[in-house]
Amino acid sequence: MRPGIAALLLFIAASPAETVRTVPVTGEGASYWTRWRGPSGQGMVEGTNYVDAWSNTENVKWRMTVPGDGHSSPIVWKDHLFLTTSREAGAKISMLAYNRHDGKLLWETNVPTTSGVEYKYEKNSHASATATTDGERVYASFGTHGLVAFDFTGKIVWHRKFGDLNNYMGSAGSPLLYKDRLFLYQDHQGSANLKSFVAAFDVKTGATKWWKDRVETTGWGTPVVITTGERDELIVSSQRKVYSYNPDTGDEFWTVRGNLFEVIPTPIAGHGFVFASSGRAGPTFAIRPGGSGDVTTSHVAWSSPRGSPFVPSSIIHGDLLYQINDMQSILTVFHAKTGELAYQERLGVAMKEGFSASPVAVGNLIYFTNDDGQTFVVEAGPTFKLRRVNELRARVLASPALVGGMWYWRTDTELLAIGK
């Protein structure tokens, strides 16, 4: 066989796996941190000019007290850093805008609230969903108080109130930008005026592009859009099932059964699969997308029966899939293509619900941060190598944003910029 033909056949054989990926942020926004888990949608960071060592004083460029309470992660566009917060036990909610270079508060806009305040679990907050931006508007979900779009001066452009949410731990899922629309799903136990739903909204007006009622009663997840090379799919990993929807119409492509009752981690994609995890220590599925109907028996390439994360999302680096189980502080690393276990190690001490932030990867290092503000810096690879442990000495439940060589961390009281 001629080398050219062999190379072509190799490309054809490899291309399906290579083209299955989370749809990234493109254009100018790819230079910033415009959404939950960054431009890649799954915690991968471009560039290597980030420090890998810090403390609550070392490499801290600036710090600013953040008013109120919230666990949403920072997002960044150019000189602006955006953060949501809540006060008065959730009766007052707002969007904050900071200058990312010096931490100066640029503006704060309060959002009109509904008459009722949503119940939340003690570890949750009334400002847990991470905002997203397209450079023209900033979009944020505040659970019962609705979905809101702001311009860069702090003016509310539109505000959609859907009805009362009845989620026994409160709301947390973040909205997702895709083309000219914004996706949001809200699974809850239902109320007099609102069922569980997944929907798409026009970014300019907030008008509904499509809406699908759902039967699930509990969930705090964030959707992702993946591409298979042939079509894009909106993936919702939720109670009992993983769903794939047509992002243009909301029509259902496929489902996979087997998730547990509680689902928080955001799905990720790579090596030809969508990876979805559920439960406080439930299963993880490697799903081949592109199917139709119930594909549980035909499209699940491999699964791990237990040990998945409850809150943090997973991350892929190279050929490996990394997961931190926050029930026991156990790092589990799989070979992503086969599900073969590479290793398991404990990070710090065993703590129930001890990790909330999702990991990020910079170069050959992966960063796992627990709720006590300890960041475990682990070298990527099939064997465990702990580089160091960084100590912020503060409670940290939000994931960081990384832009231009700077780490932006939200603690329970402060916003910090960390860099050289």
Image (cartoon, rainbow, N blue to C red):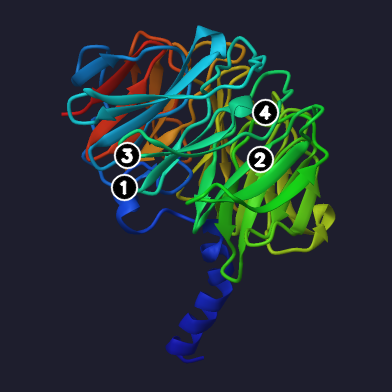
Q: How busy is the neighbourhood of tag 2: few (under 14 within 10 Å), some, or many (20 plus)?
A: many
Q: CA distance from mark 3 to mark 2?
A: 25 Å
The image quarter in which residue 239 lies? top right
Which numbered disc, 4 or 3, marks the residue that appears first in the sequence? 3
Residue occupying the far bottom of the picture: 2
In whole angstroms, how far apart are the C-alphas of marks 2 and 4? 26 Å
Label disc, if present, on residue 307 of the rendered structure: 4
Q: Label 4 vs label 3: CA separation?
A: 42 Å
User: Which circle's residue, 3 or 2, is located before the other in the chain?
Assistant: 3
The residue identified by callout 1 is 46
Q: Position of residue 103 (x, y in %)?
A: 22, 23
Camera-nearest label, 4 or 3: 3
* Kind of residue sitting beneath label 1: Glu
146 relative to 56 in the view: left or right: right
Q: Residues within 10 Å of mark 3 (few under 14, many from 20)?
A: some
Asked whether the beta carbons under mark 1 and mark 2 sit within 8 Å of each other, the answer is no
Q: Secondary structure at mark 3?
A: loop
Nearer-N-terminus badge (1/2): 1
Disc on the earlier residue, 4 or 1: 1
Residue 120 falls left or right of residue 96: right
Q: Is residue 221 above or below residue 387?
A: below
Residue picked out by circle 3: 152
The amino acid at mark 4 is: Gly
Task: Classify 144 as above or below 20.
Answer: above
Q: How far apart are labels 1 and 3 at the CA level?
A: 25 Å
Which of the 4 image quarters holds residue 74?
A: top left
